[in-house]
Image (cartoon, rainbow, N blue to C red):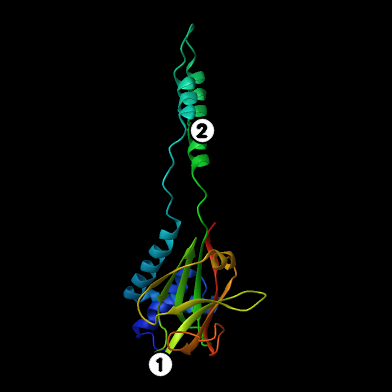
Amino acid sequence: MNYSQPTLRRALAAEYALGTMAPAARRRFEQLMQDDRALRGEVAQWQEVLSGLGSSLPLKQPPERVWKAILARIQPHTAKTPRPLWHWLVGGLATLSLVISVVFTLQPPAAPAYLAALQNDATVTALTITARGSELEVQPLAAAPIASNQSLELWIVPTAGKAISLGVVPTQGNKRIQLTPAQQREIGDSTLLAVTLEPLGGSPTGVATGPIVYKGYLKTVRS
């Protein structure tokens, strides 16, 4: 394998960061990285991209009654006798615990994110797919060139029923796809995605007409 090819290096770095590389291939890749600083940089960039999927959501403002309850505990109206130091420490820890509990309780649950590495029969990653909520992002890595009168079309392959088209995908440059509610219901952990080779503009019949060139499963990266 010619590891000097930029597209192959980038695809392998993405696969390594994603964790989909076979154990033996992963060990070989780690040995290769030891003497290849640029390749380590490629992996670091992908790890940074993936870690961004776990960024926290904005906090919500707690109701006024919550703050009143906190103030009532840390600012008592009367204090007839001095309290020992341990009492204040216990009270402070209890207050801190209450604040932390309130903040985490009021945060809305984050939409789960899913990631898939779509590969050809030679297990080379050609595209990565990121799905979260109503949006799906396609990032080509090492997709093979296609004829000017052909297109690559992305499909959800459910366990039952016919494949669902997600539209034409590029061979270069990222693309964001807005999912319909019906498509969102099909997205989840272990959902199979496939890319077929179709006439220009996609399948004219609404069903796949060409061969499957890339495929892969979505995996949860944040729950």
Q: Secondary structure at mark 2?
A: helix
Q: Is residue 126 above or below residue 199?
A: above
Q: Quadrant of the C terminus?
A: bottom right
Left or right of 168 on screen, residue 155: right
Q: Which mark is residue 149?
A: 1
Q: Return the residue nearer the eye: 46 or 161.
A: 161
Label 1 crowd (10 A; few <14 / some 14-19 / many >=20) = few
Q: Amino acid at mark 2?
A: Ser
Q: Is residue 77 above or below residue 210?
A: above
Kindly indicate the quadrant of the structure image that contains residue 209. Answer: bottom right
Which one is in front in this view, the residue at disc 2 or the one at disc 1?
A: 1
Mark 2, residue position? 97
Q: Return the residue nearer the eye: 214 or 186.
A: 186
Instruction: Return the x and y of residue 208 as percentages of the image width and height.
Output: 55, 85
Kindly check if marks 2 and 1 are in contact, taking CB atoms under 8 A apart as contact.
no
Instruction: Return the x and y of residue 68 as percentages of the image width and height.
Output: 46, 24
Q: Quadrant of the N terminus?
A: bottom left
Instruction: Return the x and y of residue 132 as percentages of the image width and height.
Output: 48, 62
Res. 32 visible in picture: no
Left or right of 45 on screen, residue 211: right
